[in-house]
Image (cartoon, grey):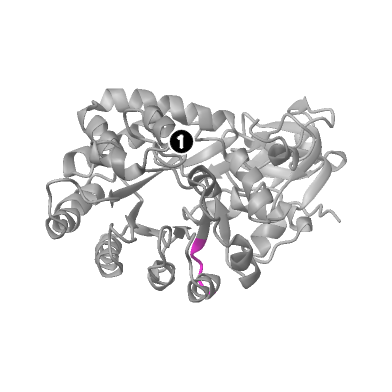
Amino acid sequence: MKKTTTRKTSPKRAASSSGIQAFVHASFVYTGEGIVEKEGRMLVPSDLSEIEDGAVVFDARKILWVGPTAELPKEFRSMKKTDLKNKSAVMPGLIDAHTHLVFAGSRAHEFARRCAGTTYKEIADEGGGILNTVKATREASVEALFEVALKRALIAYRHGVRTLECKSGYGLDHKTELKCLQVVKDLQEALPQMTFVSTYLGAHAIPVGVKKPQYIDEIIHKTLPEVKKKNLATFCDVFIDEGYFTYAEGERILRAAKKLGLGVKIHADELTETDSARLAAKLEASSADHLLKISDKGIQALAKSNTVAMMLPGTAFYLKANYAPARKLLDAGARVGIATDFNPGSCYSLNLPLMMNLSALYLSMNSAEIFAGVTYSAAASLGLQDRKGALLAGFDSDFVVLPYDRFEEMYYRMGW
């Protein structure tokens, strides 16, 4: 069953606006309207709300009208039109809502060694692992970090991503963390065709030579206020796990961030079950990410909240770990997103459609759940669900025209 409900702007606005154009005769336009109406919960394939032989009218900023090509309103018929000849589908731009985009250096040689049997601990004891990345990132200039981050952002763009969340976390000191966040701000100016969302993740690990209480005090009393003052981030994230930050430490940092007006996120229940998923729900976090070790109580807490459970299947694949229980979360009524977790150590990929493929194969997600995971639910995890993640009049016009006639081809074609 397909839905053909449309939302229009007024003819008066359309007639007086300049730069309006339309794509017509799309094989399918996937609006995701059913997903929006359900707020991303308990989805079935018909919630894709596909319109066969569809049309999209838009200007540089907003979508103005969506519906069947045969019903294109009279006031738009004289506008510039591109005929897709029923060969291409149209859908909202993809949203990758969990990446570590800004860092320097490469750990390819470490990956090869790990695959050959060297343990992560052995590599770390030699100064490798995250220490390698932190050293390279601290030494890199803003210009060098910007250049490499720009290349990575364009790779994501070519995979259909139009909104990209970028975390800091490889500086682990005041100066470098701010430097990495500044790079994200510079990316927004350089690539206006994309939307960048910054997240401060100073609490990613404990820096060498610094006692944890001292570092937490620096985060709370020095770096977070500076991040807010300079408008360098929208969110604050904390890695709550064994060997990193405890539940109590994470809650302290996140409450300080909320007091400053920042949104909060949690790297939750990844390596061990720390009850951090329930903390995310309690703090009304925008997302709880990873969740490989989430408890049943954590699942129920997220299902009753608006916190998005962010699946990062590429990381489980890369580490040969058990996948997060996406099906349990979905069946409980949670909102579930999908992201790459692009990072130098456990998932060096910006291919979001590949993560969609893994979500279909190993997380048992249906087409509407996968679609929502990289559109509406991902937008909700960034507080952007009122203008991104659906193809409806009034939403941002950052949709994508696919090089094939159905949405499902996007994750059927593995690694394309």
Image-based side of 8 in relation to 144, left or right:
right
- The residue that appears at 16% across and 57% down in the rendered structure is 212
Magenta segment, which residues?
Answer: 304-308
Instruction: Sort mark 1 into few (<14), some (14-19) or many (20+) by Cα contacts within 10 Å.
Output: few
- In this view, the residue farthest toward the front is 117
Image quarter in which the N terminus is found: bottom right
Residue 24 visible within the image: yes
Q: Amino acid at mark 1?
A: Cys
Tell me residue 222's x, y (percent). Answer: 15, 52
Q: How many marks?
A: 1
Give the image quarter of residue 160. top right
Q: Percent position (x, y) of residue 52?
A: 84, 43
Disc 1 target residue: 115
Numbered disc 1: secondary structure: helix
260 versus 22 height, above or below: below
Inspect this view and state whether residue 189 appears. no
Q: For residue 306: magenta?
A: yes
Relative depth, front residue between 28 and 203: 203
Which quarter shows the C terminus? top right
Q: Give coordinates of residue 356: x percent, y percent.
A: 63, 45
Name the residue: 17% across, 39% down.
Answer: 175
Describe residue 268's horizontal placement relative to residue 228 as left or right.
Answer: right
State the residue in front, 406 or 195: 406
Q: Is residue 2 magenta?
A: no
Horizontal side, residue 156 vs residue 261: left or right:
right
Given residues 325 and 22, the one toward you in this image is 325
Magenta stretch secondary structure, dominant: loop
Residue nearer the viewer, 160 or 62: 160
